[in-house]
Amino acid sequence: MFLEELRRLMDAHGDITTLGEISSEDSLATMAEYVTPKRLHMGYSFELLTDDFSAAHIRGTVETLEAKLQGGWPCWALSNHDVQRVASRWGGVDPHPQLARQLVALVCSLRGSVCLYQGEELGLPEADVPFEALQDPYGKTFWPNFKGRDGCRTPLPWTGDADAGFGAPRPWLPVSEAHRALSVAAQEANAESTLRAARAFLAWRKSQPALVEGSIRFLDAQEPALAFEREQDGERMLLVFNLSENSLEWNVPPQWATAMQVQAPGVATGMFTDGRVALPAHGVAVLGMSK
């Protein structure tokens, strides 16, 4: 009955876009079932909200969904209000300074729409919330084995002030001291900040049809390299991500040996010479060519 009523509303209002938050024992299969022309436009998946930051996991997740979808459109996320912030979840106690920028570029380069969780564009790590300040019932019940979800729910630091720019009333959760130096105000004033880098990449992405609407195909690459192609109307892009804190080199496939390097803003850029990509820690290389 719900889906019938939803379809009736969509038929009556053609400008409605529907997004379903889908979780089940096999959420990728359920997404494929519900994201169809007669049901939902997009499905929001939890499959990348895991502790696994391997190229194999990312590739396997995306490829599995792509194989199941029949003309549907995915929606990807790396963080939300129920899991540890991705900078800490995938970067540890002291995340590499290029990690947050790379992750914005990575999730925004997959086929589909994107949900960026508040603070990802600032590179915020997980906040340390003391027990006496907890609001999450799960954290209160299972402390200290599970500290709850409040570490990813603290106020976005608009400023470095005591109230993070929210005004006099005390916020629902305390402002993390570790977040003050990463405030929006501080990063807007710094041309080299993660925020400015994220904005630059997102603006550039909008100008790349292959990244906005193109198909996706992964290429074989040894860990920790992740490589995939995007293609739209004969325009092709190859994106290579180094998911580690060590530099690496990767030989591109022969068909890409004569490609041109594309300068993607906001990320640590790899170098492409003689058919080989050299990537710094958490670096990204983008190649482009036309058919």
Image (cartoon, helix red, strand yellow):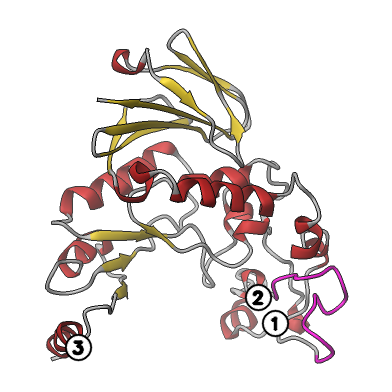
Q: Position of residue 228 (x, y in %)?
A: 35, 34
Query: Would you place residue 95 above or below residue 141 in this image?
Result: above
Q: CA distance from mark 3 to mark 1?
A: 41 Å
Q: Which residue is mark 1?
A: 134
What is the count of numbered marks? 3
Query: In the picture, which quadrant includes the N terminus?
Result: bottom left
Query: In the picture, which quadrant includes the C terminus?
Result: top left
Q: Is residue 243 magenta?
A: no
Image check: 179 left or right of 39?
A: right
Q: Is the Cβ of the residue at disc 1 closer than 8 Å to that at disc 2? A: yes
Q: Position of residue 212 (x, y in %)?
A: 36, 50
Q: Residues within 10 Å of mark 3 (few under 14, many from 20)?
A: few
Q: CA distance from mark 2 to mark 3?
A: 45 Å
Q: Position of residue 177 (x, y in %)?
A: 83, 66
Q: Which residue is mark 3?
A: 9
Q: Is the Cβ of the residue at disc 2 closer than 8 Å to that at disc 3? A: no
**Which numbered dot is residue 100?**
none
Q: Residue furthest top?
A: 274
Residue at the (33%, 17%) spot, across then down: 253
Q: Nearer the viewer, mark 1 or mark 2?
A: 1
Q: CA distance from mark 1 to mark 2?
A: 10 Å
Instruction: Tell me the magenta residue range.
Output: 155-169
Q: Nearer the viewer, mark 2 or mark 3?
A: 3
